[in-house]
Amino acid sequence: MEYRNLGRTGIKVSPLCLGTMNFGYRTPEDDAAAIVDAALDSGINFIDTADFYGQPAREGKGQGLTEEILGRALQGKRDRVVLATKFFAPVDFDDPNARGGSRRHVMRACEDSLRRLNTDYIDLYQMHRPDRDVPIDETLRALDDLVRAGKVRYIGTSAFGGWQIVEGLWQSDRLRLNRFVSEQPRYNLIDRRIENEVIPAARKYGIAILAYSPLAGGILTGKIGREQPFPEDSRFVDQAWGGWATGFLSEQVYDVIDTLQELAAAQQATASQLALAWVLGQPGVTSAIIGPRTMEQFEDNFGAIRLALAEEARQKLDQVSLPGGALFRPT
């Protein structure tokens, strides 16, 4: 395993990060614990979660179940892990203040995550979405206090635009606060929009890119094609409530899928592994977040670590995808 620096920090993380969104919802606790053990045994030292994972979001529930499961799975192993979690989404739909980037919510959300994760500190505490209603300096001051109190080691963002990342860095510099060290954006072969501003800003200012949805919710696994309907248990179908997943796939997406399968067969790999290898080899990417539902999926995803993507293959994928753009067409 060749570990990479988390942005401009001195901490080392594995190029694959274990995402846990399925834990407690689609993956039973015993299976989740086994996947965590397999990840650690394989050399993965980076695990990502969030305070509202564990319940179907379309049911309006977010109770921290995944964090609780992860806290139990990491008993006796906590020091081996760079543990990341996120705040922002509503965790109590009856309380208008139990969400967002306000100082009140940030401080409370951190304490709740620490309790559920059964840990004294969070390695990477991330703001899950920008908050248009709260000035970023208010959020940064709260996060800085958490770092100074030893409850958080580093802070990061998710789904921020390039200008929002830079604004955060500017405010940190102006107010002498701890700065964001990472950004977690959606990035895959059918959604490359972050190449326009987010990746250039991240590379300029030493921000780690932690790519989520590298398999586009299962679209790039090879299980979906022109004549293959979506499996009922696929993440794409399961998350169809999400704004980006309520549309349809263009012919260009199927061209990407066909090319992935062709190139993967030539390298005796799977389409999933090739799609992950592509993300891992992109400039500016520190880690790709995988979200296996089963041990079989984890073992398949992990195979991407050993896959070297030839330049010719990368060029073919660039030809059928859309650099700087998105092929997915929401309705």
Image (cartoon, rainbow, N blue to C red):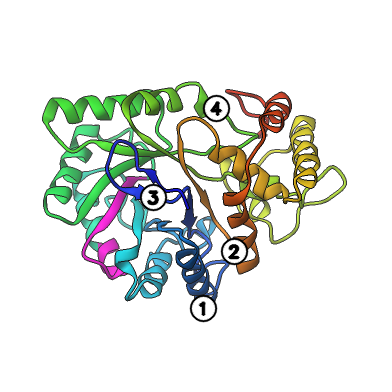
Query: Which residue corresponds to mark 3?
Result: 13
| Residues at discs 3 and 4 in contact (Cβ within 8 Å) | no
Three-letter residue code for mark 4: Arg
Which residue is located at x 23 percent, y 36 percent?
179
Specify few, some or many for label 4: CA neighbours under 10 Å numbering under 14, 14-19, or 20 or more.
some
Three-letter residue code for mark 1: Asp
Cα gap from disc 1 to disc 3, whole angstroms: 25 Å
Specify few, some or many for label 2: CA neighbours under 10 Å numbering under 14, 14-19, or 20 or more.
many
Cα gap from disc 3 to disc 4, whole angstroms: 25 Å
> Which residue is at the front of the view, 109 or 180?
180
The magenta stretch is 112-127
Residue 224 on image: x %, y %: 77, 48
The magenta stretch spans residue 119:
yes
Residue 188 on image: x %, y %: 59, 38
Three-letter residue code for mark 3: Val
Cα gap from disc 1 to disc 4, whole angstroms: 37 Å
Query: Which residue corresponds to mark 2?
Result: 293
Label annotation for residue 30: 1
Relative to 321, does residue 67 appear above or below in the rendering?
A: below
Three-letter residue code for mark 2: Arg
